[in-house]
Amino acid sequence: GQNIDQPTEMTATEGAIVQINCTYQTSGFNGLFWYQQHAGEAPTFLSYNVLDGLEEKGRFSSFLSRSKGYSYLLLKELQMKDSASYLCAVTDSNYQLIWGAGTKLIIKP
Amino acid sequence: NAGVTQTPKFRVLKTGQSMTLLCAQDMNHEYMYWYRQDPGMGLRLIHYSVGEGTTAKGEVPDGYNVSRLKKQNFLLGLESAAPSQTSVYFCASRTGDDTGELFFGEGSRLTVL
């Protein structure tokens, strides 16, 4: 079967750095997405990786290793507004998106 | 910019009642999707469409029907609502590029009593 694993919940301190991991086992791979979802709101796009390596976008970076079936989202200089759920999703060989259950990130002052 | 708009935002139904959720997008996207999101679970695909006049089943299609008569609209119907269909429903769209990001509507919270 197809599976995406993420930690259920993480806690970090304002101003610090946090890394959210995502491991996947899917039938084929055509890219990996990270989305942010604030409570009661819709998911919004953060990043897309299809090749191995690190993609940096401001305070957020996303890393992919296809051989290991692994990705992480790195958030730097954490702000209170970063408190949200972070969703990992993989596009499989049929170009269908497979979603992880999401990681709830709690930021403490 | 409206983007993806869902109506209604909230609805309470009694078991056995029917209803339709409407999704409208103004970005000329080919692909449209209906997901449901339940606590502790990832987004689950109900039905999707890759173009006007086409629909296909997703991971959890039972109890739902859809139609895409116009490119900009994607309707999700519940013919006979059940308590198990209590959920938050999200519509999403993207271009015909399979690697394109999804744009989501604000969600529709449905409660079936």
Image: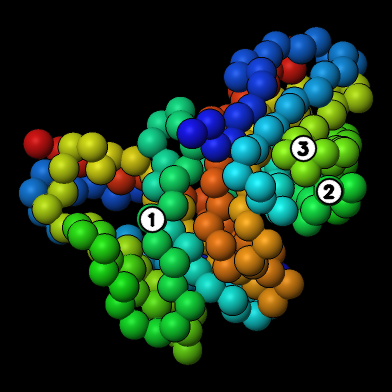
Q: Which of marks 2 and 3 is nearer the N terminus?
A: 2
Give the alpha-carbon distance from disc 2 to disc 3, as whole Å. Answer: 9 Å
Give the alpha-carbon distance from disc 3 to disc 1, as whole Å. Answer: 25 Å
Res B37 seen here: no
Depth order, front residue of B51/A100: B51
Q: In this view, does B86 lie to the left or right of A64?
A: right
Q: Residue A46 carries which label?
A: 1
Residue ID at (33%, 68%): A62
**Mark nearer the viewer, 2 or 1:** 2
Give the position of the N terminus of chain A as an image quadrant. bottom right
Parent chain of label 2: B
Residue ID at (81%, 23%): B20
> Which class describes the residues within 10 Å of circle 2: few (<14), some (14-19), or many (20+)?
some
- SS class of the residue under badge 1? strand
- Picture quadrant of residue B67: top right
Look at the picture and state if B27 lies above or below B12: below
Q: Is residue B44 left or right of residue A12?
A: right
The three-letter amino acid code for the residue at tag 3 is Phe
Q: Do the residues labelled 3 and 1 touch (CB within 8 Å)?
A: no
Parent chain of label 3: B
- SS class of the residue under badge 3? strand
Q: Is residue A26 left or right of residue A104?
A: right
Q: Where is residue B29 in the image (x, y as percent from the top left)?
A: 66, 50
Q: Are dots 2 and 1 on a single chain?
A: no
Give the position of the C terminus of chain A as an image quadrant. top left
Q: In this view, does B10 lie to the left or right of B67?
A: left
Q: Are dots 3 and 1 on a single chain?
A: no
The three-letter amino acid code for the residue at tag 1 is Leu
Which residue carries the number 3 mark?
B74
Look at the picture and state if B9 lies above or below A39: above
- SS class of the residue under badge 2? loop
Q: Residue B52 carries which label?
A: 2
